[in-house]
Image (cartoon, rainbow, N blue to C red):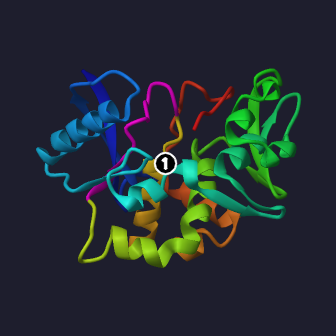
Amino acid sequence: MAERPIFVPERNAPGFVKEISFSIPWAPGFAPVQKKKNVKALHEAAALKGFSPLLEISTKSDEVAGQHLSAFHLRVQSEVGEIPLECAYQGSKVFERGGPFIDLYEAEPRAAKRDPRLHHSGHLIRFEFEGHKFPLQPTTVFYDWLYLRAIYPHRDWLKQRLISEESSYAGFTDIEFNPNKSLNCQARSCALFVALLHDDILEKALSSPEAFIKTMKEHMRPRIGKEEGNQLSL
């Protein structure tokens, strides 16, 4: 058995997203078929509590929208052009003894994540991206900013596929996300996007980094994670 969460857009929840965990039978292994079994088990457990349908946000999703919303495929517009979300996140880390390491913006995503400087520069103290500083609290604010900025240009397409009368989801999942090991989650970020879109404050919140940080601080209780002050993993 394993505990895995679903993320439900909720305007009155801290950070606009309600996180609900379910205990499910876990199919071990790395084969795609095993991952799909786990997605099915989580969605079935949530459906019994009234949360259906759900959209899996990952490369393991059966839905095209879920695959396209995977952070693995997303790129962020920057001053040097479009860069992989992973590279933007890792290269913007600022530590006690170094950073941001903006050369990682041009690296291969897996190489960026494994760069030794990220592990030998002391405690993480903030993020810096294009001259803007992002704090460690709220915990996922910088990752959320990157994710939302990456999908914002496709907001009309997403509105039709995520919250239209023909296609509306009760929540979102990412079967790879283990809350005991990571903080950032693409499914939570997607739920945040939908919540802001529902409340008609998406454009205002994304008008600037400062506006987004202010919006999230006003609506989110600090989430203290195991990795705070060290590494935040995707």
Residue bearing mark 1:
186
Q: Nearer the viewer, residue 220 or 25?
A: 25
Magenta extent: 170-182
Rendered location of residue 80, percent (x, y): 84, 61
Give SS at disc 1: helix
Q: Quadrant for residue 93, please give it.
A: top right
Q: Is residue 91 above or below residue 172?
A: above
* Residue 127 is inside the magenta segment: no
**Picture quarter with the N terminus:** top left
Rendered location of residue 34, percent (x, y): 31, 30
Answer yes or no: is residue 200 visible.
no
Rendered residue at 48%/56% (across/down):
219
- Residue furthest to the left: 48
Q: Quadrant for residue 96, please give it.
A: top right
Q: Is residue 109 left or right of residue 22?
A: right
Q: Nearer the viewer, residue 176 or 15?
A: 176
Main SS, magenta region, reads loop
Q: Is residue 153 left or right of residue 200?
A: right
Looking at the image, how many numbered discs can be counted on the residues?
Answer: 1
Q: Nearer the viewer, residue 46 or 158?
A: 158
Rendered residue at 28%/34% (across/down):
38
Rendered location of residue 7, percent (x, y): 35, 48
Answer yes or no: is residue 134 visible.
yes
Rendered location of residue 156, percent (x, y): 46, 78
* Residue 175 is inside the magenta segment: yes
Rendered residue at 41%/26% (across/down):
30
Q: Residues within 10 Å of mark 1 (few under 14, many from 20)?
A: many
Q: Is residue 115 left or right of residue 232?
A: right
Q: Is residue 24 above or below residue 211?
A: above
Q: Amino acid at mark 1?
A: Gln
